[in-house]
Protein backbone atom coordinates (compact mmCIF):
# COMPACT_ATOMS: atom_id res chain seq x y z
CA UNK A 1 0.00 0.00 0.00
CA UNK A 2 1.48 3.34 -0.91
CA UNK A 3 1.52 6.17 1.53
CA UNK A 4 1.15 9.84 0.71
CA UNK A 5 4.13 11.57 2.21
CA UNK A 6 5.11 15.12 1.55
CA UNK A 7 1.96 16.88 0.64
CA UNK A 8 -0.25 15.97 3.60
CA UNK A 9 2.14 17.38 6.16
CA UNK A 10 0.72 19.69 8.75
CA UNK A 11 2.92 22.52 9.91
CA UNK A 12 2.78 22.97 13.67
CA UNK A 13 1.72 26.29 15.11
CA UNK A 14 4.29 28.91 16.09
CA UNK A 15 4.30 28.00 19.79
CA UNK A 16 4.70 24.34 19.03
CA UNK A 17 7.56 25.02 16.66
CA UNK A 18 9.40 26.88 19.42
CA UNK A 19 8.63 24.01 21.73
CA UNK A 20 9.91 21.55 19.17
CA UNK A 21 13.30 23.26 19.05
CA UNK A 22 13.54 23.16 22.83
CA UNK A 23 12.63 19.53 23.07
CA UNK A 24 15.01 18.59 20.30
CA UNK A 25 17.92 20.26 22.02
CA UNK A 26 17.06 18.48 25.26
CA UNK A 27 17.02 15.20 23.38
CA UNK A 28 20.63 15.63 22.41
CA UNK A 29 20.32 15.64 18.69
CA UNK A 30 17.42 13.21 18.26
CA UNK A 31 16.18 13.94 14.79
CA UNK A 32 17.85 17.31 15.06
CA UNK A 33 18.51 17.80 11.40
CA UNK A 34 14.83 17.87 10.56
CA UNK A 35 13.05 18.74 13.81
CA UNK A 36 14.99 21.81 14.87
CA UNK A 37 14.09 23.71 11.74
CA UNK A 38 10.53 24.95 11.52
CA UNK A 39 10.59 24.60 7.75
CA UNK A 40 10.86 20.85 8.13
CA UNK A 41 7.23 20.75 9.16
CA UNK A 42 5.81 22.57 6.25
CA UNK A 43 6.12 24.17 2.94
CA UNK A 44 4.25 27.16 4.39
CA UNK A 45 6.34 30.28 4.89
CA UNK A 46 7.07 30.99 8.55
CA UNK A 47 5.21 34.28 8.30
CA UNK A 48 2.21 32.27 7.14
CA UNK A 49 1.98 30.45 10.44
CA UNK A 50 -0.53 32.10 12.71
CA UNK A 51 -2.88 31.32 15.52
CA UNK A 52 -5.99 29.80 14.07
CA UNK A 53 -9.29 31.46 14.90
CA UNK A 54 -8.17 33.67 17.80
CA UNK A 55 -10.99 34.82 20.09
CA UNK A 56 -12.52 37.90 18.41
CA UNK A 57 -12.03 41.05 20.46
CA UNK A 58 -15.12 43.19 20.85
CA UNK A 59 -15.93 46.20 22.96
CA UNK A 60 -18.65 44.61 25.06
CA UNK A 61 -18.20 40.83 25.08
CA UNK A 62 -15.78 39.19 27.49
CA UNK A 63 -16.19 35.53 26.53
CA UNK A 64 -18.42 33.29 24.44
CA UNK A 65 -18.98 29.88 25.94
CA UNK A 66 -20.06 26.79 24.00
CA UNK A 67 -23.83 26.45 24.07
CA UNK A 68 -23.78 22.75 24.94
CA UNK A 69 -21.99 21.88 28.14
CA UNK A 70 -19.89 18.75 27.88
CA UNK A 71 -21.07 16.10 30.39
CA UNK A 72 -18.53 15.37 33.11
CA UNK A 73 -16.55 12.16 32.74
CA UNK A 74 -14.89 10.66 35.82
CA UNK A 75 -11.17 10.43 35.19
CA UNK A 76 -10.91 6.84 36.41
CA UNK A 77 -13.80 5.82 34.14
CA UNK A 78 -11.99 7.25 31.10
CA UNK A 79 -8.98 5.11 31.93
CA UNK A 80 -10.71 1.88 32.87
CA UNK A 81 -14.04 1.77 31.04
CA UNK A 82 -12.99 2.85 27.57
CA UNK A 83 -11.38 0.31 25.29
CA UNK A 84 -11.49 -1.01 21.76
CA UNK A 85 -14.52 -3.15 20.99
CA UNK A 86 -16.19 -4.56 17.92
CA UNK A 87 -19.85 -5.33 17.36
CA UNK A 88 -20.34 -8.41 15.21
CA UNK A 89 -22.47 -7.65 12.14
CA UNK A 90 -25.81 -9.45 12.51
CA UNK A 91 -27.45 -8.95 9.13
CA UNK A 92 -26.96 -7.67 5.60
CA UNK A 93 -27.36 -4.02 6.56
CA UNK A 94 -24.67 -4.37 9.26
CA UNK A 95 -22.32 -6.00 6.79
CA UNK A 96 -22.83 -3.19 4.28
CA UNK A 97 -22.05 -0.66 7.03
CA UNK A 98 -18.90 -2.51 8.07
CA UNK A 99 -17.72 -2.87 4.48
CA UNK A 100 -18.18 0.86 3.89
CA UNK A 101 -16.17 1.70 7.01
CA UNK A 102 -13.35 -0.62 5.93
CA UNK A 103 -13.26 1.06 2.52
CA UNK A 104 -13.25 4.49 4.12
CA UNK A 105 -10.55 3.49 6.56
CA UNK A 106 -8.39 2.26 3.71
CA UNK A 107 -8.80 5.55 1.84
CA UNK A 108 -8.16 7.62 4.96
CA UNK A 109 -5.02 5.67 5.80
CA UNK A 110 -3.65 6.56 2.40
CA UNK A 111 -4.81 10.17 2.56
CA UNK A 112 -3.28 10.82 5.99
CA UNK A 113 -0.13 8.80 5.46
CA UNK A 114 -1.09 6.47 8.30
CA UNK A 115 0.92 3.39 8.94
CA UNK A 116 1.14 1.93 12.39
CA UNK A 117 2.59 -1.08 14.12
CA UNK A 118 0.42 -4.13 13.74
CA UNK A 119 -2.89 -3.46 15.44
CA UNK A 120 -3.37 -6.75 17.10
CA UNK A 121 -4.69 -8.43 19.00
CA UNK A 122 -8.00 -6.63 18.54
CA UNK A 123 -9.83 -8.15 21.45
CA UNK A 124 -12.67 -6.69 23.45
CA UNK A 125 -11.39 -5.33 26.73
CA UNK A 126 -7.78 -5.46 25.64
CA UNK A 127 -6.15 -2.28 26.91
CA UNK A 128 -3.01 -2.93 24.86
CA UNK A 129 -4.33 -3.12 21.32
CA UNK A 130 -0.91 -2.76 19.81
CA UNK A 131 1.82 -5.30 19.33
CA UNK A 132 5.02 -3.60 18.28
CA UNK A 133 6.27 -6.14 15.81
CA UNK A 134 6.93 -3.95 12.79
CA UNK A 135 9.10 -0.88 12.61
CA UNK A 136 6.37 1.55 11.49
CA UNK A 137 6.02 4.62 13.57
CA UNK A 138 3.82 7.65 13.77
CA UNK A 139 5.28 11.02 14.75
CA UNK A 140 3.35 13.78 16.51
CA UNK A 141 2.87 15.52 13.17
CA UNK A 142 1.53 12.40 11.50
CA UNK A 143 -0.90 11.79 14.33
CA UNK A 144 -2.13 15.37 14.09
CA UNK A 145 -2.60 15.01 10.35
CA UNK A 146 -4.76 11.97 10.97
CA UNK A 147 -6.72 13.56 13.81
CA UNK A 148 -7.45 16.73 11.83
CA UNK A 149 -8.63 14.84 8.77
CA UNK A 150 -10.72 12.35 10.75
CA UNK A 151 -12.35 15.00 12.91
CA UNK A 152 -13.13 17.17 9.91
CA UNK A 153 -15.34 14.43 8.48
CA UNK A 154 -16.56 13.03 11.82
CA UNK A 155 -18.81 16.03 12.43
CA UNK A 156 -20.81 15.40 9.26
CA UNK A 157 -23.10 12.37 9.94
CA UNK A 158 -24.67 13.71 13.16
CA UNK A 159 -25.52 16.98 11.47
CA UNK A 160 -26.99 15.26 8.39
CA UNK A 161 -29.05 12.86 10.51
CA UNK A 162 -30.28 15.66 12.76
CA UNK A 163 -31.19 17.83 9.78
CA UNK A 164 -33.14 15.05 8.07
CA UNK A 165 -34.97 14.09 11.27
CA UNK A 166 -35.77 17.76 11.88
CA UNK A 167 -37.25 18.14 8.40
CA UNK A 168 -39.00 14.80 8.71
CA UNK A 169 -40.64 15.84 11.97
CA UNK A 170 -41.95 19.06 10.44
CA UNK A 171 -43.00 17.49 7.17
CA UNK A 172 -44.87 14.62 8.79
CA UNK A 173 -46.22 16.73 11.63
CA UNK A 174 -44.96 14.40 14.34
CA UNK A 175 -42.53 14.30 17.23
CA UNK A 176 -38.90 13.32 16.82
CA UNK A 177 -38.69 11.80 20.32
CA UNK A 178 -35.43 13.43 21.31
CA UNK A 179 -32.99 12.13 18.71
CA UNK A 180 -32.13 15.46 17.10
CA UNK A 181 -30.41 17.01 20.12
CA UNK A 182 -28.12 14.04 20.68
CA UNK A 183 -27.15 13.95 17.01
CA UNK A 184 -26.43 17.67 16.93
CA UNK A 185 -24.49 17.40 20.16
CA UNK A 186 -22.40 14.67 18.59
CA UNK A 187 -21.44 16.78 15.59
CA UNK A 188 -20.72 19.74 17.86
CA UNK A 189 -18.48 17.49 19.95
CA UNK A 190 -16.58 16.34 16.84
CA UNK A 191 -16.12 19.95 15.77
CA UNK A 192 -14.65 20.74 19.19
CA UNK A 193 -12.19 17.87 18.66
CA UNK A 194 -11.23 19.41 15.33
CA UNK A 195 -10.83 22.91 16.76
CA UNK A 196 -8.68 21.54 19.58
CA UNK A 197 -6.29 19.79 17.19
CA UNK A 198 -6.22 22.80 14.88
CA UNK A 199 -4.82 24.79 17.80
CA UNK A 200 -1.81 22.49 17.61
CA UNK A 201 -1.38 22.23 13.86
CA UNK A 202 -2.26 24.23 10.81
CA UNK A 203 -3.11 22.12 7.77
CA UNK A 204 -1.15 22.72 4.59
CA UNK A 205 -2.91 23.55 1.33
CA UNK A 206 -3.13 19.91 0.24
CA UNK A 207 -4.83 18.86 3.45
CA UNK A 208 -7.22 21.82 3.19
CA UNK A 209 -8.13 20.68 -0.29
CA UNK A 210 -8.68 17.12 0.90
CA UNK A 211 -10.89 18.31 3.75
CA UNK A 212 -12.96 20.29 1.28
CA UNK A 213 -13.31 17.37 -1.12
CA UNK A 214 -14.01 14.84 1.64
CA UNK A 215 -16.74 17.01 3.13
CA UNK A 216 -18.43 17.46 -0.23
CA UNK A 217 -18.43 13.76 -0.97
CA UNK A 218 -19.21 12.58 2.55
CA UNK A 219 -22.05 15.04 3.18
CA UNK A 220 -23.84 14.13 -0.02
CA UNK A 221 -23.42 10.39 0.28
CA UNK A 222 -24.50 10.52 3.92
CA UNK A 223 -27.53 12.61 2.95
CA UNK A 224 -28.67 10.14 0.32
CA UNK A 225 -27.87 7.07 2.40
CA UNK A 226 -29.76 8.40 5.42
CA UNK A 227 -32.84 8.88 3.27
CA UNK A 228 -32.61 5.26 2.14
CA UNK A 229 -31.62 3.52 5.39
CA UNK A 230 -31.05 5.50 8.58
CA UNK A 231 -30.46 2.28 10.51
CA UNK A 232 -27.52 1.32 8.27
CA UNK A 233 -26.13 4.84 8.63
CA UNK A 234 -26.16 4.66 12.44
CA UNK A 235 -24.47 1.27 12.29
CA UNK A 236 -21.93 2.74 9.87
CA UNK A 237 -21.15 5.55 12.32
CA UNK A 238 -20.94 2.97 15.13
CA UNK A 239 -18.28 1.07 13.17
CA UNK A 240 -16.52 4.31 12.25
CA UNK A 241 -16.32 5.20 15.93
CA UNK A 242 -14.85 1.77 16.69
CA UNK A 243 -11.99 2.82 14.43
CA UNK A 244 -11.76 6.21 16.14
CA UNK A 245 -11.44 4.54 19.55
CA UNK A 246 -8.72 2.33 18.11
CA UNK A 247 -6.85 5.28 16.59
CA UNK A 248 -6.85 7.20 19.88
CA UNK A 249 -5.97 4.07 21.88
CA UNK A 250 -2.92 3.58 19.68
CA UNK A 251 -1.91 7.23 20.00
CA UNK A 252 -2.23 7.00 23.80
CA UNK A 253 -0.22 3.80 23.76
CA UNK A 254 2.53 5.42 21.63
CA UNK A 255 2.61 8.35 24.00
CA UNK A 256 2.84 6.13 27.08
CA UNK A 257 5.66 4.18 25.46
CA UNK A 258 7.72 7.34 25.03
CA UNK A 259 7.40 7.45 21.25
CA UNK A 260 5.99 10.98 21.16
CA UNK A 261 8.43 13.14 23.15
CA UNK A 262 6.98 16.47 22.00
CA UNK A 263 3.72 15.61 23.72
CA UNK A 264 5.27 14.48 26.98
CA UNK A 265 7.58 17.45 27.27
CA UNK A 266 6.86 19.50 30.42
CA UNK A 267 6.37 22.63 28.29
CA UNK A 268 3.52 21.07 26.34
CA UNK A 269 0.23 22.84 27.01
CA UNK A 270 -3.26 21.62 26.21
CA UNK A 271 -5.05 24.38 24.23
CA UNK A 272 -7.33 26.66 26.28
CA UNK A 273 -10.28 25.82 24.06
CA UNK A 274 -10.02 22.19 25.27
CA UNK A 275 -9.59 23.15 28.92
CA UNK A 276 -12.76 25.28 28.72
CA UNK A 277 -14.79 22.71 26.81
CA UNK A 278 -14.05 19.60 28.87
CA UNK A 279 -13.47 21.65 32.05
CA UNK A 280 -10.17 19.85 32.46
CA UNK A 281 -8.83 20.10 36.02
CA UNK A 282 -5.47 21.82 36.48
CA UNK A 283 -3.52 18.65 37.20
CA UNK A 284 -4.94 16.79 34.19
CA UNK A 285 -3.81 18.94 31.30
CA UNK A 286 -1.29 16.71 29.56
CA UNK A 287 -1.65 15.47 25.99
CA UNK A 288 -2.38 12.00 27.37
CA UNK A 289 -5.27 13.40 29.40
CA UNK A 290 -6.59 15.25 26.39
CA UNK A 291 -6.50 12.06 24.32
CA UNK A 292 -8.34 10.24 27.10
CA UNK A 293 -11.13 12.82 26.91
CA UNK A 294 -11.35 12.62 23.13
CA UNK A 295 -11.31 8.82 23.14
CA UNK A 296 -14.08 8.72 25.76
CA UNK A 297 -16.16 10.95 23.48
CA UNK A 298 -15.56 8.60 20.55
CA UNK A 299 -16.58 5.64 22.69
CA UNK A 300 -19.76 7.51 23.55
CA UNK A 301 -20.52 8.11 19.87
CA UNK A 302 -19.88 4.42 19.23
CA UNK A 303 -22.34 3.45 21.95
CA UNK A 304 -24.95 6.00 20.83
CA UNK A 305 -24.86 5.04 17.17
CA UNK A 306 -24.77 1.29 17.69
CA UNK A 307 -27.76 1.72 20.01
CA UNK A 308 -29.68 3.96 17.60
CA UNK A 309 -28.96 1.37 14.91
CA UNK A 310 -30.82 -1.19 17.06
CA UNK A 311 -33.98 0.90 17.39
CA UNK A 312 -37.14 1.53 15.44
CA UNK A 313 -36.12 4.69 13.61
CA UNK A 314 -39.63 6.14 13.47
CA UNK A 315 -41.20 5.28 16.79
CA UNK A 316 -38.61 4.70 19.53
CA UNK A 317 -37.60 7.53 21.86
CA UNK A 318 -33.93 8.46 22.22
CA UNK A 319 -32.83 6.30 25.19
CA UNK A 320 -29.90 8.60 26.00
CA UNK A 321 -32.12 11.49 27.09
CA UNK A 322 -35.07 9.51 28.48
CA UNK A 323 -36.18 9.09 32.09
CA UNK A 324 -36.61 5.48 33.14
CA UNK A 325 -39.42 3.97 35.19
CA UNK A 326 -36.85 2.17 37.33
CA UNK A 327 -33.81 4.48 37.44
CA UNK A 328 -31.86 2.02 39.62
CA UNK A 329 -31.43 -0.35 36.64
CA UNK A 330 -28.40 0.66 34.51
CA UNK A 331 -29.63 2.46 31.41
CA UNK A 332 -28.21 4.69 28.64
CA UNK A 333 -27.31 8.24 29.58
CA UNK A 334 -24.98 11.07 28.69
CA UNK A 335 -22.10 9.97 30.93
CA UNK A 336 -19.75 7.00 30.80
CA UNK A 337 -20.71 5.28 34.07
CA UNK A 338 -22.58 2.57 32.19
CA UNK A 339 -20.88 2.72 28.85
CA UNK A 340 -21.84 -0.10 26.45
CA UNK A 341 -19.12 -0.43 23.80
CA UNK A 342 -21.30 -2.35 21.34
CA UNK A 343 -24.54 -0.49 22.07
CA UNK A 344 -27.69 -1.34 24.03
CA UNK A 345 -30.10 -3.86 22.63
CA UNK A 346 -33.65 -2.65 22.04
CA UNK A 347 -35.29 -5.09 24.43
CA UNK A 348 -33.08 -3.89 27.31
CA UNK A 349 -34.11 -0.27 27.14
CA UNK A 350 -37.37 0.40 25.29
FE1 LIG B 1 -13.87 13.00 17.27
FE1 LIG C 1 -16.57 10.37 16.96
Image (cartoon, helix red, strand yellow):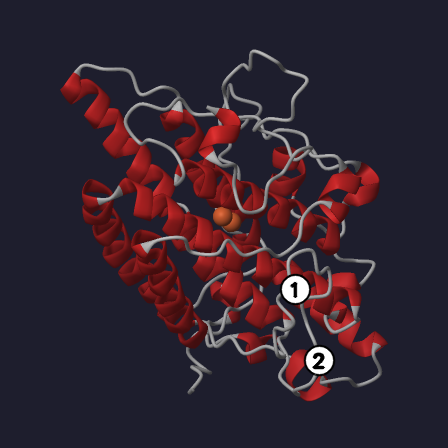
Q: Is residue 186 left or right of residue 25?
A: left
Residue on which the image places disc 1: 251
Residue on which the image places disc 2: 132
Q: Choose between 224 and 51: the one closer to the eye.
A: 224
**Percent coordinates x, y for residue 314 in the rendering:** 28, 27
Decide: is 214 above or below 276: below
Q: How many marks?
A: 2
Q: Is residue 127 left or right of residue 206?
A: right
Q: Residues within 10 Å of mark 1 (few under 14, many from 20)?
A: many
- The answer to whether mark 1 is within 8 Å of ligand 1 is no
**Percent coordinates x, y for residue 174 in the rendering:** 23, 15
For numbered disc 1, what is the local secondary structure?
Answer: helix
Rendered residue at 36%/19% (across/down): 177
| Front tag of 1 and 2 | 2
Q: Residues within 10 Å of mark 2 (few under 14, many from 20)?
A: some
- The answer to whether mark 2 is within 8 Å of ligand 1 is no
Rendered residue at 52%/21% (across/down): 61
User: Residue farthest to the top?
Assistant: 325
Decide: is 63 above or below 278: above
Q: Earlier in the sequence, mark 1 or mark 2?
A: 2
Decide: is 60 above or below 98: above
Visible residue check, residue 299: yes
Q: Which mark is residue 215?
A: none
The alpha-carbon separation of the residues under discs 1 and 2 comes to 13 Å
User: Residue farthest to the left?
Assistant: 171
Q: Choose between 231 and 35: the one closer to the eye.
A: 231
Q: Choose between 211 and 135: the one closer to the eye.
A: 135
Amino acid sequence: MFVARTSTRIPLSKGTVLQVSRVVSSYGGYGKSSLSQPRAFSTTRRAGLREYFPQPETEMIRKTKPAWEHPEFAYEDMKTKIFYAHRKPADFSDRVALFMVRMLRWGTDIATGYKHDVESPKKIGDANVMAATKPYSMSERKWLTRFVFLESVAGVPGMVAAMLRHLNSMRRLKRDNGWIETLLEESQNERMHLLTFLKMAEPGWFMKLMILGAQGVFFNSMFLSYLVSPRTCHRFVGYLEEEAVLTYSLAISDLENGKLPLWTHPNFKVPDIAVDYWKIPEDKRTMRDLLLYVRADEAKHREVNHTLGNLDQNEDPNPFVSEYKDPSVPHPGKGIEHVRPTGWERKEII
